[in-house]
């Protein structure tokens, strides 16, 4: 029987050139984030199925790779009437749920606030397409135990610094607040239970535009007057940015019947939080080694159901999409313990970052030169010893050295080695 040589659908093999870029990026991520005080941790790839299906992960909960019970437990469950009765765990779809379980389980041994750095693979049974895989790497930084906006500011500053070190410029950090998102829908007069439906449609704005959002909201049965009012939040007015438009509408009673002032008072804190984050980032922007823009984005939704406060996302021209996202999730840790722990995190789309680097022909910088010593295939033991001693000498001088047998097609071999960064390719002849 011939075995299948292609990887499982939705997975991919990683060739040496890409692996070198990935290793370099991971090293720079760790170095940068640790310089901001984040501490590396690790958690298991598998989680309890109940943790993964707690109604906090949005549509990702429908994409879980479920793992069947084993041994006696599986035998006892064979009479089950549902597939879920055969399952007790699953591959994690992100790192946040695992982090919250980790923190709840180990909090007595951790400082407060705790700044966590976690890099690992996650799995989603999504439809594979270009740039979207079923197994991919996430890089997360999180602050647990800090309710102040200092957590958000540090997360944004650290991630912007990292992107700058990777050579990206001109990216945009988008900022919104879940409470403002809900307030805009309430202000517009949508039915009280229609918020999530409205947000799902709004989240498509980058693909279908404002007119498309309007069409879909009306098709979903939303009142035309509410749709018109809602869309006005996303249209800049002359001399006013979108944050000013939002504040102007939500904080000034406009003659509607009901508790307008009470409504305005409820969104005072979210507005103050957004303004604080933006002011602090602007104050330190010159010290961050990256050219980027910070913008309030009332259309930013973030799909995860666990976000409770500020949410943010970074879009990168080179990637043509967002490459990082996160926000505050103050209630998620409380699902694992009786204590309510404030928490906030930022996740980098590692695969998109690597893809963007490869698309622009990125090469890994190396302090040491790379030397290839090509020896004859039929060399005797003395010649073999001589080439190995020469390689050792060069390595002690700081070079990275490859020893390989010389190919018959020397031109092709040299071109291949130069493509891999071996700028010094030598035909070694034993003395």
Image (cartoon, helix red, strand yellow):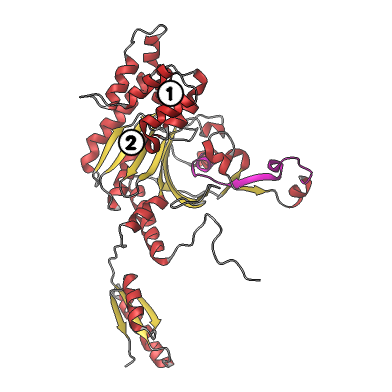
Q: State how far apart marks 1 and 2 are (Cα).
A: 17 Å
Question: Magenta part of the protein: which range?
Answer: 78-101
Q: Which residue is mark 1?
A: 182
Residue 148 shows up from this direction? no
Residue drawn at point x = 39 percent, y = 89 percent:
376
**Which quarter of the figure has residue 247?**
top left
Q: Quadrant of the N terminus?
A: bottom right
Q: Which structural element holds mark 1?
A: helix
Coordinates of residue 125 in the picture (x, y in percent): 56, 47
Question: Which one is nearer the viewer's eye here, 263 or 397?
Answer: 263
Q: Quadrant of the C terminus?
A: bottom left
Residue 219 shows up from this direction? yes
Q: Which structural element holds mark 2?
A: strand
Coordinates of residue 326 in the picture (x, y in percent): 41, 38
Residue drawn at point x = 56 percent, y = 44 percent:
63
Is residue 409 shown in magenta? no
Which one is earlier in the sequence, the residue at label 1 or at label 2?
2
197 vs 27, left or right, is: right
**Discs 1, 2 touching: Cβ within 8 Å:** no
Coordinates of residue 94 in the picture (x, y in percent): 50, 44
Q: Residues within 10 Å of mark 1 (few under 14, many from 20)?
A: some
The correct choice, above or below, for 66 with respect to 239 in the image is below
69 vs 207, left or right, is: right
Q: Which residue is mark 2?
A: 174
The correct choice, above or below, for 416 with respect to 183 in the image is below
Coordinates of residue 360 in the picture (x, y in percent): 30, 57
Question: Count the marks: how many?
Answer: 2
């Amino acid at each position: 029987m011939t075995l299948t040589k292609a990887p499982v659908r939705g997975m991919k093999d990683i060739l040496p050139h890409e692996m070198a870029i990935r290793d370099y990026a991971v090293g720079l991520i760790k170095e940068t984030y640790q310089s901001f005080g984040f501490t590396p941790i690790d958690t298991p790839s598998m989680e309890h199925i109940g943790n993964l299906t707690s109604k906090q992960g949005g549509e990702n909960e429908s994409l879980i790779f479920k793992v069947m019970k084993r041994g006696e437990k599986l035998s006892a469950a064979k009479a089950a009437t549902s597939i879920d009765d055969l399952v007790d765990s699953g591959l994690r779809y992100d790192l946040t749920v695992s982090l919250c379980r980790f923190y709840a389980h180990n909090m007595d041994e951790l400082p407060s606030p705790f700044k966590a750095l976690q890099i690992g693979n996650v799995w989603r049974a999504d439809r594979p397409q270009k740039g979207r895989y079923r197994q991919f790497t996430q890089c997360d930084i999180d602050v647990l135990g800090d309710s102040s906006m200092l957590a958000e500011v540090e997360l944004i500053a650290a991630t912007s610094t990292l992107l700058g070190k990777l050579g990206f410029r001109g990216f945009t950090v988008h900022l919104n607040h879940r409470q403002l998102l809900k307030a805009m829908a309430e202000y517009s007069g949508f039915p009280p239970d229609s918020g999530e439906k409205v947000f799902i449609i709004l989240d498509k704005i980058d693909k279908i535009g404002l007119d498309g959002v309007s069409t879909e909201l009306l098709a979903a049965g939303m009142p035309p007057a509410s749709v018109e009012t809602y869309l006005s939040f996303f249209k800049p007015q002359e001399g006013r940015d979108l944050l000013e438009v939002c504040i102007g509408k939500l904080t000034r009673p406009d003659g509607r019947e009901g508790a307008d002032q009470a409504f305005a008072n409820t969104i005072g804190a979210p507005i103050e939080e957004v303004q604080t984050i933006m002011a602090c980032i602007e104050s330190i922007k010159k010290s961050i080694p990256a050219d980027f823009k910070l913008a309030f984005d009332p259309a930013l939704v973030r799909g995860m159901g666990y976000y409770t406060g500020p949410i943010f996302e970074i879009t990168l021209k080179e990637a043509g999409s967002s490459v990082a996202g996160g926000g505050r999730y103050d209630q998620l840790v409380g699902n694992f313990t009786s204590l309510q722990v404030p928490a906030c995190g930022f996740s980098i789309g590692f695969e998109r970052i690597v893809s963007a680097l490869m698309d622009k022909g990125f090469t890994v910088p190396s302090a040491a030169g790379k030397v290839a010593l090509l020896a004859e295939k039929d060399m005797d033991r003395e010649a073999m010893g001589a080439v190995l001693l020469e390689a050792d000498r060069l390595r002690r001088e700081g070079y990275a050295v490859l020893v390989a047998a010389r190919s018959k097609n020397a031109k092709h071999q040299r071109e291949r080695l130069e493509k891999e960064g071996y700028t010094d390719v030598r035909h070694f002849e034993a003395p």
